[in-house]
Every structure is written in structure tokens, then in C-alpha cells.
Image: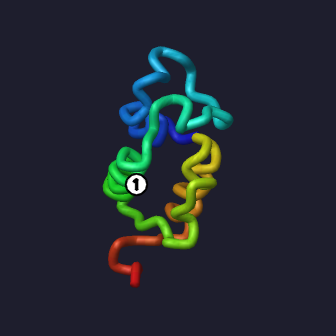
Amino acid sequence: MDAVFVDVLRRFLPLLGEQEMTAEAPLRELGLDSMQSIELLFALEDTFSIRLPEDVLTEETFSTAGRLWRATSAAIGDGSTAAGRT
């Protein structure tokens, strides 16, 4: 996982503390609720200048750090920018 991604994600996980972030980190168990998921989505989109496609905005995507990173990195890789979103 990208260090910038981890830094952004860490801000939304109050129960993570000083623990190391792993791909298997269960985001809900670490304090991410539904409202924070939306705020996290906007933070990731702003930080990486991307737009995550609506089809990946699922509970499963936000279940672990690794799944969310895969969706984010895919959007970075395919150039899913704000201008390209319909």
C-alpha cells in the first residue's frame, strides 16, 4: 500500500492507534463508520486527484485497507479523474 494512502486512511481509524496498517486491517473494527467512509472517499479522491467509479463504492471495498487500496490504485492507474467521471 502506498504511504500517502496509509496516512490518509489512518486519520479515519481512531482505534488503530500506533499499530501498523496491514492490508487485512478491518476498517469497521478500527472505527470507520458509514459517514466517515464518505469523508474518506472524498479525502482519497482529493489526495490522488481521482474519482472512484460508482461500481466499487461498496461495503466490501471499504471492508479492509487492502481492498480499498486496490480500488484506489486501480483508479490512479486508469486515470479516473474528476473530468472523466459521468
22, 2: nearer the viewer? 22
Pointer 1 residue: 41
- Above or below, 75 relative to 2: below
The residue carrying pointer 1 sits among few (fewer than 14), some (14 to 19) or many (20 or more) residues within 10 Å by Cα, namely some
- Above or below, 82 relative to 9: below
- Above or below, 1 relative to 58: above
**Residue visible at 53% across and 41% down in the picture:** 2
Horizontal side of 46 relative to 37 (left or right) equals: left
Report x, y in % for residue 3: 49, 35
Residue 4 appears in view: no
**Residue visible at 61% across and 42% down in the picture:** 64
Horizontal side of 24 relative to 13 (left or right) equals: right
The number of numbered badges drawn on the structure is 1
The colour scheme is rainbow
Which quadrant of the structure image shows residue 19?
top right
Q: Amino acid at mark 1?
A: Leu
Report x, y in % for residue 69: 57, 48
| Mark 1 secondary-structure assignment | helix
Residue sitting farthest toward the top: 18
82, 13: nearer the viewer? 13
Say which quadrant the N terminus sits in: top right
Say which quadrant the C terminus sits in: bottom left
Report x, y in % for residue 34: 42, 49
**Residue visible at 36% across and 49% down in the picture:** 35
Report x, y in % for residue 24: 67, 35
Residue 54 appears in view: yes
Residue sitting farthest toward the bottom: 86
